[in-house]
Image (cartoon, rainbow, N blue to C red):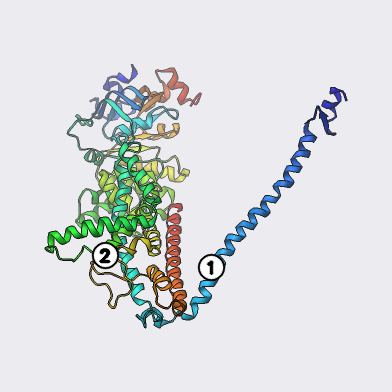
């Protein structure tokens, strides 16, 4: 099965020449993941290695399971009644479904940005500080510093620094989405999951989000679901193609887009279906 | 007439064995039906007008009769001369005190129930269904039954129990009092609070809840920091609707704490109190000289109506602001 490709083969060609030949380290190791919504199976035997400090794109037609897969990585699917996951998801070697795993701590390490920007109806400052406050941080200076740092990381600081007490919902769509990224970054995660973060944005805002992802990948492991083939090709090092709940093919983005091993992958990335 | 022409000549009505057939005949019937139907707008319109007229007559009657007596003195003075003169200040004070106490009891319980139903109970669980049935039936119980319940449960059971336990059997809480009346009203208005709160919680975008969980919030933190602040307008609306309902109720309080006449204002939880609705009842049926109280009666009713309308208007305003916030 293509999903079982040894890690050494996953090193993208263009990275090969630049860095050493050592295999990239794995941040999240998924083995035999099966996922069910009640009687419906949404993911079938998925094996997947998310590489540390790189961008991994998940592509596939609607309903193929890519968003479900993304949401199993921080157990957001726990919220869905009747949903259940089987198999192993290891984050830095620890099974995230283990009995002594604190799911709130997991979600602080594995942050998430949603398709539709969803800032709270609060001020910009309070949006970014939300995760810190619920983590029990009261120190005003710590919070102020984290707010500024996160907004800078999300390339939003210069646009909002004079208006931190303005309402988040008054920002533009693109700004709101970057605010959501800042909010996710404020709790200092290692991994950032992004579910089509630019699909509702105009091309300029999309460009800014893509630049931002480019900047962030040296510090964060990023997994992004996207419907946009060009976007996947532009921003990711690795790409996984899902179809009908199965991981059809997974490898370096360049290989997936130029010499895919599977016919279905080729048909999809060339736009013949989907 | 041949069957052939019956099919082809679709412009003339055709009779086949007493049964009318084909399109033009049907449309002829339809027009007869339509003529009957055109009575309906007139009939419904007339009945609607009746409803409006009734409201206008009631309001006109009350305003015309009551506006003259609506003076500053009337609003701030005690009743005098066997309630044929003076004002209704104790009744206004008692009403406000009563509904504030009622709100203090009803809102926390109502909000907690709504949170339980929405975020803790599984929607189809036996417990959730039981609570829902209870809430719906609570809303349908006649208010006099609440009055009797309040007398039996709060006054005689809880009140006497407190007296036995803390006052050595001396009468302190085992009698009609403002606390029992407000608790009885709280039970009566609980469904309003629960339903409006749940509605407000249902209106919170799922995105907010997900964002909160994704930032590592627990369920309780999500409820406290996201759900409750975002349904605050709905909770307030529920509270105001409960107040406007509760302020007009007489039956639940007449056995549980409302007084015919008191020379003092209620200051303790176990004091009795005067109340506007009950005062209207007293003026119109219990007064020694009903004729003389009539002008006062009109003005009292007007005050009660204005109070209730103002509270309803406030609820509508708050709900509009709530809608605007989510539209933006």
Position of residue A184 relative to residue B283, above or below, is: above
Position of residue B303 relative to residue B193, above or below, is: below
Q: Quadrant of residue A31?
A: top left
Disc number lying in front (1 or 2): 2
Q: Residues within 10 Å of mark 2 (few under 14, many from 20)?
A: many
Badge 2 element: loop
Q: Are marks 1 and 2 on the same chain?
A: yes
The residue lying at 43 percent from left, 66 percent from top is B308
Q: Position of residue A195 (x, y in %)?
A: 38, 37
Position of residue B166 relative to residue A230, above or below, is: below
Looking at the image, the residue that sits furthest to the front is B288
Residue toward you, A81 or A62:
A81
Quadrant of the drawing holding the N terminus of chain B: top right
Q: What residue does disc 2 label?
A: B176
Badge 1 element: helix
Q: Position of residue B232 (x, y in %)?
A: 35, 56
Please say if the residues under marks 1 and 2 sit with CB atoms less than 8 Å apart.
no
Q: What residue does disc 1 label?
A: B58
| Precedes in sequence: disc 1 or disc 2 | 1
Q: Position of residue B130 (x, y in %)?
A: 33, 41
Q: Position of residue B287 (x, y in %)?
A: 40, 75
């Amino acid at each position: 099965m293509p999903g079982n490709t040894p890690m050494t083969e996953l090193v993208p060609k263009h990275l090969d020449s630049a860095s050493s030949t050592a295999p990239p380290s794995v941040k999240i190791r998924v083995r035999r993941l099966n996922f069910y919504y009640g009687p419906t199976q949404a993911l079938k035997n998925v094996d997947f290695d998310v590489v540390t400090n790189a961008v991994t794109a998940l592509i596939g037609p609607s309903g193929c399971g890519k968003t479900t897969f993304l949401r199993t990585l921080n157990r957001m699917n726990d919220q869905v009644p009747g949903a259940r996951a089987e198999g192993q998801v290891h984050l830095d070697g620890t099974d995230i479904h283990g009995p002594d795993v604190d799911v709130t701590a997991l979600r602080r390490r594995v942050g998430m940005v949603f398709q539709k920007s969803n800032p709270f109806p609060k001020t910009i400052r309070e949006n970014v500080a939300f995760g810190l406050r619920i983590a029990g941080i009261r120190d005003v200076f710590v919070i102020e510093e984290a707010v500024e740092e996160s907004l800078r990381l999300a390339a939003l600081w210069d646009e909002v620094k004079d208006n931190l007490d303005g309402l988040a919902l008054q920002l533009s769509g693109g700004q709101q989405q970057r605010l959501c990224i800042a909010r996710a970054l404020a709790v200092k995660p290692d991994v950032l999951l992004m579910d089509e973060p630019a699909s509702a944005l105009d091309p300029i805002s999309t460009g800014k989000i893509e630049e931002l992802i480019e900047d962030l990948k040296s510090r964060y492991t990023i997994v992004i679901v996207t419907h946009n083939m060009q976007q996947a090709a532009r921003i990711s090092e690795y790409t996984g193609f899902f179809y009908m709940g199965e991981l059809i093919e997974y490898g370096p983005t360049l290989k997936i887009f130029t010499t895919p091993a599977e016919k279905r992958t080729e048909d999809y990335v060339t736009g013949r279906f989907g | 007439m041949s069957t052939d022409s019956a099919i082809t000549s679709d412009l003339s009505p055709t009779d086949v064995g007493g049964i009318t057939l084909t399109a033009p005949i049907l449309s002829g019937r339809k027009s007869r039906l339509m003529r009957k139907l055109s009575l309906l707008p007139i009939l419904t319109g007339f009945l609607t007008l009746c409803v409006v007229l009734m409201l206008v007559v009631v309001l006109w009657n009350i305003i015309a009769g009551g506006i003259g007596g609506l003076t500053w003195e009337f609003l701030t003075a005690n009743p005098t001369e066997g309630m044929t003169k003076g004002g209704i200040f104790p009744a206004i004070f008692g009403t406000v005190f009563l509904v504030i106490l009622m709100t203090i009891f009803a809102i926390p319980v109502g909000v907690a129930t709504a949170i339980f139903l929405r975020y803790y109970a599984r929607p189809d669980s036996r417990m959730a269904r039981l609570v829902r049935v209870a809430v719906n039936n609570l809303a349908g119980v006649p208010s006099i039954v609440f009055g009797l319940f309040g007398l039996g449960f709060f006054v005689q059971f809880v009140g006497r129990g407190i007296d036995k336990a803390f006052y050595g059997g001396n009468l302190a809480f085992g009698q009609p009092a403002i606390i029992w009346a407000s608790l009885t009203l709280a039970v009566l208005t609980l469904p309003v609070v629960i339903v409006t709160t749940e509605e407000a919680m249902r209106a919170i975008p799922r995105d907010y809840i997900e964002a909160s969980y994704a930032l590592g919030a627990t369920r309780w933190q999500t409820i406290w920091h996201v759900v409750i602040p975002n349904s605050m307008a709905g909770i307030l609306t529920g509270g105001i609707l409960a107040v406007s309902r509760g302020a007009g109720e007489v039956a639940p309080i007449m056995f549980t704490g409302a007084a015919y006449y008191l020379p003092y204002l209620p200051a303790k939880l176990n004091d009795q109190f005067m109340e506007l609705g009950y005062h209207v009842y007293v003026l119109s049926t219990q007064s020694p000289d009903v004729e003389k109280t009539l002008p006062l009666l009109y003005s009292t009713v007007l005050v009660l109506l204005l109070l209730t309308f103002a509270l309803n208007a406030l609820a509508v305003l708050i709900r509009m602001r709530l809608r605007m916030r989510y539209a933006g």
